[in-house]
Image (spheres, rainbow, N blue to C red):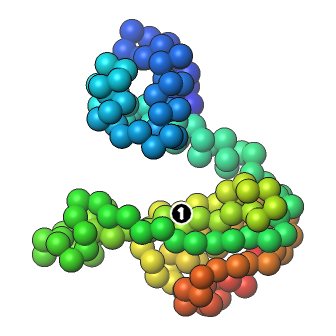
Amino acid sequence: MYKNLCTGSMNKLPTAKRAGILGMMVAGVSIRAISRMTNASKNKIVKLLADAGNAYSEYQDRVFVNLPCKRIQVAEIRFFVYAKQKNVIAGKRRQFGYGDDWTWTALCADTKRVPSRYVGTRDADAAYRFISDLGAVLANRAQLAADGHKAYLTESSARI
C-alpha cells in the first residue's frame, strides 16, 4: 500500500498537493472543504487518506516494537457510522460499521506516542484485543491509567 501513496502516475495527485491535503486533514478541515480548496475530487481525497492510513499502519507495525513506555493512558472515543445507534434500522443493528463504534487509544504519558489503537465495539472482547496489541509492542510492563471502564478489569489488563 505504501507504494500507492508514493508512486507517481497520471491518476495520482502531485506530491506537494498530497502533502497539502494530508496537512488539511490533520488540521481538521472537512473533505468537502478540501475538495473545494484544492480542486481534487472527494473520492481522490478519501483514497489518499486510506493510502496514508495503510502506510502509517505498516510503518507503526514495523517500527513500534519493544517500546520503553512506563506510563500508559488509555481511552475510548465514540463515533457513529451511518446513523446513531438508536436510529439504526433493524436489519443493520449489531453489524459492525452501523451505529456506535469506538476508537480505543493508548498514549505514552512521557513521549506522547500512540503505541496502539483499535477500532471496534466497547466490550470485553475489544478490550482484550486492544490490550493484547498494546502489550505486544511494549518492552516491559507498564502502569495503565484508564477511565474506569469495566472491560479493562478483565484478564486483558494483566497482559501489560
- Type of amino acid under label 1: Tyr
Q: Position of residue 112 (x, y in %)?
A: 73, 56
Identify the residue shown where x is 36% and y is 40%. 30
Relative height, residue 75 to residue 51 (above, below): below
Identify the residue shown where x is 22% and y is 64%. 83
What is the quadrant of residue 69 in the picture?
bottom right
Q: Position of residue 144 (x, y in %)?
A: 73, 78
Q: Quadrant of the C terminus?
A: bottom right
Q: Is residue 147 left or right of residue 79?
A: right
Q: Position of residue 91 (x, y in %)?
A: 13, 71
What is the quadrant of residue 82 in the picture?
bottom left
Residue 82 is at least partly visible in this image: yes
Q: Which one is in front, 139 or 43?
A: 43
Give the residue at the far left of this rendering.
90
Identify the residue shown where x is 50% and y is 40%. 27
Q: Which residue is mark 1?
A: 118
